[in-house]
Amino acid sequence: MAVVRTFARNHLWSVLCLLGLVISTGHAPFSLWPVSLICLSLAFRLHEAHECRKPSFKSSFKNGWWLGFGFFLGTLNWLVEPFLVDIATHGWMAPFAVVLVSGGLALFWGAGMSLGHILGGKLGCVIGLGLCEVARGYLFTGFPWGLLGYIWVDTPVAHLASYFGAYGLTAITFGFCALLAQSFYVRRKIMGLASLFLVLLAVWIFGNTVRPTYTAPENATVIRLVQPNAPQDKKFDPKFAMDYFQRMLNFSQQAPQPDLIVWPETSLPIAYNFAADLILQIKEASKGVPVLVGALRAKDDKIFNSLVLIDPQMDAKVIYDKYHLVPFGEYLPFENFLAKIGLGFSSELFGTGFQHGPGPRVVNLPNVGKILPLICYEAVFPQDVSAMPQRADVIVQVTNDAWFGQFSGPYQHLAQAQMRSIEQGIPMVRVANTGVSGLIDPNGRIVEKLQLGETGYIDVVLPVGEFSTLYSRYGNWTVVILFMTLGIGNVILRNRH
């Protein structure tokens, strides 16, 4: 044991990076949440031991950065996938993208540990990391992908998100691991571990008890989810694009007819402005049933990522334009500045030219009710879903997860969509180009689904979200109250010691 301690002390940053990498296995597709809890607790223990010997703001930042770098490197391994679609042009950038993004996001964990150093104690570290994870979701348009709280998504503990959201659940997870690390110090370690186990068991039972199984009424809405399974490198290739379009037409005309048909993001092989003939084919195939179709459209030299309602009884119309665009995919951050300093060529390497829509909106569809449309990446942001102007009956997310590959990205994206349903207490219909498409109930459970890489369609019966959650009513104010409580607790503990 002494040898292990000596090695960890002499190679602290390497050990923290490795622990961060293992902590990431709590996310899908591994979902090894017990491993994440144990490794994060060990990281807290190592950090505190180092602080006792050489306390400094700088060393705290480095500890947090190395831990975060390992965590994000493991969580965001899917970032190589978009660069492999056109490997001859962009493949060389794949390793740089993963390393640079992971290193950049690790700055938040470094800042969190540094703030914890200022606040003092393990609880101070919990507050620092929790606040910086909230900041990660907002600063520079935000990128809250892979919050630690998502490790709970398929467990009853995830129900806590209906009170505190994903940001609050992340802070609670940091807090639990800090307590677990503290149990290493107590004289009766078994008693400390047993107490934490009982706390987790109580939360588990509570989550199971208060999460009912939703059933749909007899006259419930039936929605058809269409999954063409088009690989990204062939999706817009003229040799294959119409084959995938025909595939979706065939799925849409199958009997019995539903109340609504939903196609995934960017389903039309050409821009909406020039797709009059294709829209006519969709109207004929749907046999009177409205169809929601993801499509690109051009306007005034700008491109919009839109959701179009094609109703056989009226003209097709755009009901929603994507609001939260993907940096380096749909727009280039600081594009004007980069052009001024001679780096304008960056727009040719990265996505640019997309225009964002006005923001979240609720659309009333006949025979369906009020829907909150989300396009792809928008489901990652708790604050965007909370910003809906009125409570929706169902969240409809269309996405093209072919960009994320076949391993971790699509499953992590799905987990984050599940958490949005838990937070709001609203069912979600999720339609992905390559999967996973399915129905998520108001408790975040996947009721029906088409697997990743599967071609086909399913008709899902829409359950009713019976009540609004605490988080849906007050949003991140519940997170503010949580952090205020943690702050008061930290002051009390520091005064006691």
Image: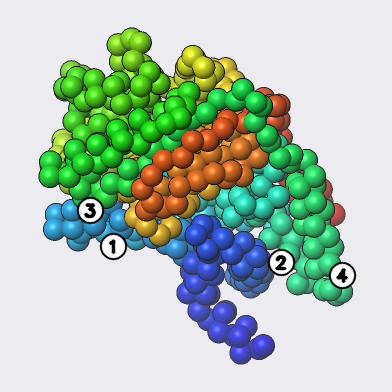
Which is more N-terminal, label 4 or label 1? Answer: 1
Name the side, left or right, on which 174 lies relative to 187.
left
What is the crowding at mark 3: few (fewer than 14 residues within 10 Å), some, or many (at least 20)?
some
Q: Please tell me which residue is depicted at 49% across the width and 36% down the height of the picture.
A: 459
Name the side, left or right, on which 202 lies relative to 177.
right
Q: Nearer the viewer, residue 360 or 339?
A: 360
Mark pair 4, 3: CA separation: 53 Å
What is the crowding at mark 4: few (fewer than 14 residues within 10 Å), some, or many (at least 20)?
few
Q: Quadrant of the C terminus?
A: bottom right
Q: Which mark is drawn over residue 95? A: 1
Which is more N-terminal, label 1 or label 3? Answer: 3
Tell me the SS state at disc 3.
Answer: loop
Which is more N-terminal, label 3 or label 2? Answer: 3
Mark pair 4, 2: CA separation: 13 Å
Q: Badge 3 is on which residue?
A: 85
Inspect this view and state whether residue 130 appears.
no
Q: Nearer the viewer, residue 481 or 430?
A: 430
Q: Nearer the viewer, residue 497 or 436?
A: 436
Where is residue 393, by image quadrant? top right
Q: Badge 4 is on which residue?
A: 191
Which is more N-terminal, label 1 or label 2? Answer: 1
Amino acid beneath label 1: Pro
Amino acid beneath label 4: Met
Which is more N-terminal, label 2 or label 4? Answer: 2
